[in-house]
């Protein structure tokens, strides 16, 4: 377990180690873990350009919070992008805001998530909303922003979901279209596993990119309250505060420990660099340690499943964006 003391000591060093004016995009920071990451990075970053996506019902409260942060940090800029990341057709609005106004992207942080406990109710684009938020919209955003990320000296991606919890895929029905293949947990594992495989695929094509897929454990957020309401057994465990999870998330997206290069904040003496998956990303558990999913992932890689998953995903992007008129 990486101790909170180690994490705090590293995060404080961001004030001196984080280059001025970093550009950071959050999708899912209207509450919970990423809201805490956003608040913590606001304390340490010098004149950051922070972009945060909020769907329309959450936009007024999130704008109010960003306005308070703007007053507290006058040299920083906070931009709210109103969009619903459940819909792939809304992703070009998000990515074009960045490509229009920024010359590089330093950090991309995903944490919007949803579990369809009420049953599968497809999005207007015909996707399971959990897979749309946890997988498709994250990968479409990342794929679209790769040119901007590659202009950063140290590009970092944090996907808050289920790193290390990968499971065998339903390879014949990747988006679980057949009703008999879908369940709330099947969709969660399918999205998380496709996420790891596709993040690895993009990491291999973009070797300067440091990608962390993190399973945060049980954290006291609106998602947890919902999981408890629906009686999910794992949700009954003692929860970490969102405040602490945010400090941890900030560490995973800035420390050299989880970086393919020297990172932003060097590792403290005596702490070892985290181990990457064989596919080249950091699968990190609730304790901050690397998780080993090779027993599940290696046979899939040997059979070429990552390429199949990525080609299928590109097909979903093309089909969906065409339907949306983009
Ligand atoms: N908390 C835990 O115990 C836990 C455990 C394991 C994994 N995770 C995963 O970690 C990530 C972050 O979790 P969190 O607990 O910090 O989440 P959270 O605070 O409950 O929600 C994070 C974000 O998800 C968005 N969101 C929720 N439902 C949505 C929907 N139907 N459509 C569009 N956006 C939606 C929220 O937007 P709004 O403000 O608009 O609702 C918010 O911005 C999620 O992917 C979650 O599944 C959490």
Image (tube, grey):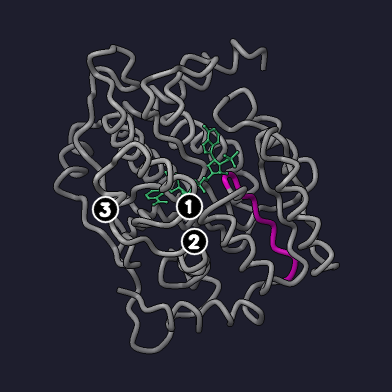
Q: Mark 1: is the Cβ under 8 angstroms from ligand 1?
A: yes
Local SS, label 3 = loop
Residue at point 14%, 47% (across, down): 295
Q: Earlier in the sequence, mark 3 or mark 2?
A: 2
The percent coordinates of residue 24 (x first, y second) are: 65, 55
Q: Which mark is residue 278?
A: 3
Q: Label 2: which residue? A: 242
Q: Which residues are magenta?
A: 20-28
Whether label 3 lies within 8 Å of ligand 1 gets the answer no
Give the mark, 1 or 3, whose residue is nearer the N terminus. 1
Give residue 276's position: percent from left, percent from top.
31, 60
Q: Is residue 305 left or right of residue 61?
A: left
Residue position marked by numbered label 1 in the rendering: 221
Quadrant for the C terminus, please: top right
Which residue does the image show at 33% across and 14% down from the upper left? 177
> Is residue 143 placed above or below 35 in the rendered structure?
above
Q: What distance separates the C-alpha of mark 2 from that of mark 1?
A: 6 Å
| Discs 2, 1 touching: Cβ within 8 Å | yes
Q: Secondary structure at mark 1?
A: loop
The residue drawn where x is 75% and y is 39% is: 97
Cα separation, mark 1 vs mark 3, equals: 32 Å
């Amino acid at each position: 377990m990486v101790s909170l003391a180690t994490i705090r000591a590293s995060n404080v060093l961001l004030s001196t180690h984080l280059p001025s004016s970093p550009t950071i995009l959050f999708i899912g920071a209207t509450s919970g873990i990423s809201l805490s990451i956003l608040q913590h990075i606001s304390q340490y970053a010098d004149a950051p350009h922070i972009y945060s996506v909020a769907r329309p019902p959450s936009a007024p409260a999130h704008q109010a919070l960003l306005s308070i942060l703007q007053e507290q940090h006058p040299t920083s800029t906070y931009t709210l992008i109103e969009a619903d990341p459940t819909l792939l057709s809304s992703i070009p609005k998000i990515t074009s805001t960045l490509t229009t106004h920024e010359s590089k992207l330093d950090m991309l942080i995903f944490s919007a998530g949803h579990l369809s406990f009420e049953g599968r109710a497809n999005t207007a684009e015909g996707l399971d909303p959990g897979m749309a938020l946890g997988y498709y919209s994250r990968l479409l955003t990342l794929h679209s922003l790769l040119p901007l990320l590659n202009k950063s000296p140290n590009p970092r991606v944090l996907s808050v979901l289920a790193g290390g919890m990968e499971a065998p895929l339903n390879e014949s029905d990747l988006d679980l279209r057949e009703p008999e293949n879908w369940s709330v947990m099947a969709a969660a594992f399918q999205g998380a596993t496709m996420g790891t495989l596709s993040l690895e695929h993009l990491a291999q094509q973009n070797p300067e990119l440091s990608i962390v897929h993190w399973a945060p454990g049980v954290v006291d957020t609106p998602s947890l309250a919902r999981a408890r309401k629906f009686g999910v057994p794992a949700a009954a465990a003692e929860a970490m505060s969102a405040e602490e999870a945010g400090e941890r998330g900030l560490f995973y997206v800035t420390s050299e420990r989880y970086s393919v290069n020297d990172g932003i904040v060097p590792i403290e003496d005596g702490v070892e660099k985290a181990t990457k998956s064989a596919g080249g990303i950091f699968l990190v558990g609730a304790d901050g340690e690397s998780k080993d999913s090779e027993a599940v992932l290696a046979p899939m890689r040997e059979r070429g499943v990552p390429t199949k998953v990525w080609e299928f995903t590109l097909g979903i992007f093309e089909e969906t964006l065409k339907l949306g008129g983009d």
